[in-house]
Image: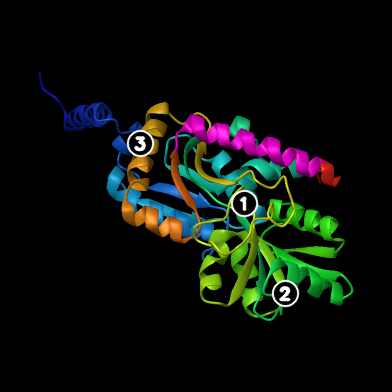
């Protein structure tokens, strides 16, 4: 039998695909080894972007394909989430996100443009973290109690920067204000990087964001983290008390970081990528880099990530409802 060149190439391609799949790699990787794009919903320079780039560098070696980070900042991650929904479910586009975009936004925005339950599937979780309250270098307070007293000397009014509107930091600012009888204004930014810029320039006296967003400048003495959420103190900040220690219970449930894919993405790809994440997270240098950012590193399977997301949603549903906030 005589084969044309095209037929021969097609046969070879099918054989290569079968060989790749027999080794556990996805169809998307087998067909041309297209780069995997990881979307990040915040600008470069923040904690989410930093974590994505650390993981992408190792995943490209583990998976044998380029892994690229693409920033799509805006609307607290909504733009990136909408881009994920519109992407083909072939394993070439993923979304690295924390709790805000996946869990909180769908509860506080009437039409975010996506439904995590219907449009996304969990791929792998890689860390939990805590949000923190920090004061700028121009603020005289050295502790949370001193901050509260300082605001009271200012007529009990103060502005607190947050990375995004209608976020857990915004609700935390509200809870703090009610607890200590302060008139605190949550001032939203487009991500943690511009918030940090204003704090470093003493344009705003305090901010709430994740520990990874604050940790380097805290260590450098440029800002001061004075309280953290969670059930226990953070190993990266052993001298900083939790809000529970300060008399504010109910803020112990931890936010998370995870990677998500469009609904319908082949299970073979998801399983393979999750397994690659587990190997990357076991690398001492990766664990050290992420831990130094204030993350508690640990691999979560797709099922475990879905469970973490559900538990976090239940905890913050109570807080949001008790605040009287209405979806907008």
**Viewer-proximal residue among 324 and 238:** 238
User: In this figure, which residue is indicated by the disc labeled 3?
Assistant: 275
Query: Given the current orientation, which residue lies at the most extreme left position?
Result: 1
Asked if marks 3 and 2 touch (Cβ < 8 Å), the reply is no
Q: Residue at x 60, y 63 (%)?
A: 240
For residue 209, above or below residue 231: below
**Viewer-proximal residue among 268 and 31:** 268
Quadrant for residue 106, please give it: top right
- Give residue 261's position: percent from left, percent from top: 50, 38
Magenta segment includes 322: no
User: In this figure, which residue is indicated by the disc labeled 2?
Assistant: 204
Q: Earlier in the sequence, mark 3 or mark 2?
A: 2
Secondary structure under the numbered disc 2 in the rendered image: loop
**Viewer-proximal residue among 75 and 133:** 133
Task: Specify the segment rendered in magenta.
Answer: 300-321
- Label 1 environment density (alpha carbons within 10 Å; few <14, some 14–19, many ≥20): many
């Amino acid at each position: 039998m005589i084969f044309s060149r095209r037929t021969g190439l097609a046969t070879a391609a099918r054989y290569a695909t079968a060989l790749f799949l027999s080794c556990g790699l996805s169809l998307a990787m087998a067909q041309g080894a297209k780069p995997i794009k990881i979307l990040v919903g915040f600008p470069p320079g923040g904690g989410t972007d930093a974590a994505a780039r650390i993981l992408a560098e190792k995943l490209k070696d583990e998976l044998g394909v380029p892994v690229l980070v693409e920033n799509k900042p805006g609307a607290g991650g909504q733009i990136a989430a909408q881009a994920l929904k519109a992407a083909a479910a072939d394993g070439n586009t993923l979304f690295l996100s924390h709790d805000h975009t996946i869990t909180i936004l769908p509860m506080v925005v009437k039409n975010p443009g996506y439904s995590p339950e219907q449009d996304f599937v969990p791929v792998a979780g890689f860390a939990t973290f805590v949000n923190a309250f920090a004061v700028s270098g121009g603020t005289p307070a050295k502790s949370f109690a001193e901050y509260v007293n300082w605001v009271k000397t200012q007529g009990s009014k103060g502005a607190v920067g947050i990375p995004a509107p209608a976020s857990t930091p915004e609700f935390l600012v509200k809870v703090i204000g009610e607890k200590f009888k302060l008139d605190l204004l949550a001032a939203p930014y487009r991500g943690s990087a511009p918030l940090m810029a204003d704090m470093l320039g003493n344009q705003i006296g305090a901010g709430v964001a994740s520990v990874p967003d604050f940790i380097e400048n805290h260590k450098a003495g440029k800002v001061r983290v004075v309280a953290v959420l969670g059930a226990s103190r953070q190993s990266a900040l052993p001298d900083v008390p939790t809000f529970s220690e300060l008399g504010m219970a109910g803020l112990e449930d931890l936010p998370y970081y995870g990677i998500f894919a469009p609904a319908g993405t082949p299970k073979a790809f998801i399983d393979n990528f999750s397994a690659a994440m587990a190997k990357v997270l076991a690398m001492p240098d990766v664990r050290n880099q992420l831990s130094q950012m204030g993350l508690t590193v640990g691999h979560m399977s797709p099922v475990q990530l879905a469970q973490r997301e559900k538990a976090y949603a239940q905890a913050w549903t109570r807080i949001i409802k008790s605040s009287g906030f209405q979806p907008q």
